[in-house]
Image (spheres, rainbow, N blue to C red):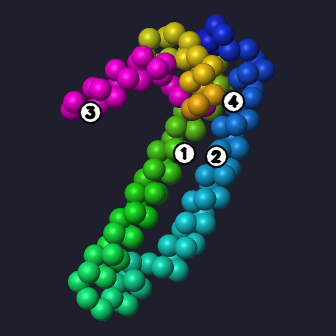
Amino acid sequence: MMARDLSPQATAKFKAQIEAHYAALLDEIESELRRSRRDSHVELAGRVRDMAEDSVADLVADLEIGDLVRHSDELFAIKEALDRIASGAYGTCVDCGEPIGLDRLNAQPTAKRCYVCKIKHESVVVAE
């Protein structure tokens, strides 16, 4: 079901934005992986002269892992959004079935929930 206030032109615009973000994200991941190979934790730790520097090496490695997890989550959100576009469900909240709203989609083209349901979902996740 296509959102009532989302025209085919608007959907095409969001699809183009999502696909552009996907391409940029893949480039960023590739760049980070190349850099990570150069500055691997083993190399950083091998140059460490004391415990404080070892902590910095661990922090750098943890940050890189965190970036990869965030990128993975973004890629999954992009795939879901493109699937919703293909099925005609893009712009419709997956929880309540109401339109997500253009302001929210402009801010977050991969959004799958309207603002109200997003807040409810986040409060449940935080409470768990």
Mark 4 sits on what residue? Answer: 14
Q: First in sequence, mark 2 or 1: give its number.
A: 2
Q: Amino acid at mark 4?
A: Phe
Give the CA separation, mark 1 to mark 3. 23 Å
Question: What residue is rendered at 34% in x and 69% in y?
Answer: 59
Based on the displayed image, in which of its 4 quarters is residue 33 positioned?
A: bottom right
Mark 2 sits on what residue? Answer: 22
Q: Amino acid at mark 2?
A: Tyr
Q: First in sequence, mark 1 or 3: give its number.
A: 1
Q: Is residue 58 left or right of residue 23?
A: left
Question: What residue is rendered at 78% in x and 20% in y?
Answer: 9
> Residue 90's spot in the image, x, y percent?
61, 21
Based on the displayed image, in which of its 4 quarters is residue 83 positioned?
A: top right
Mark 1 sits on what residue? Answer: 75
* In the depicted structure, whether residue 3 falls above or below residue 66: above
Question: What residue is rendered at 22% in x and 30% in y?
Answer: 127
Mark 3 sits on what residue? Answer: 126
Give the CA separation, mark 2 to mark 3. 28 Å
Give the CA separation, mark 2 to mark 4. 12 Å
Badge 4 element = helix
Tag on residue 105?
none
For discs 4 and 1, the disc positioned in front in the rendered view: 4
Give the CA separation, mark 4 to mark 3. 29 Å
Q: First in sequence, mark 2 or 4: give its number.
A: 4
Residues tagged 4 and 1 counted as in contact (Cβ below 8 A): no
Tell me the crowding category of disc 2: few under 14, some 14 to 19, or many 20 or more residues within 10 angstroms, Cα based: some
Badge 1 element = helix
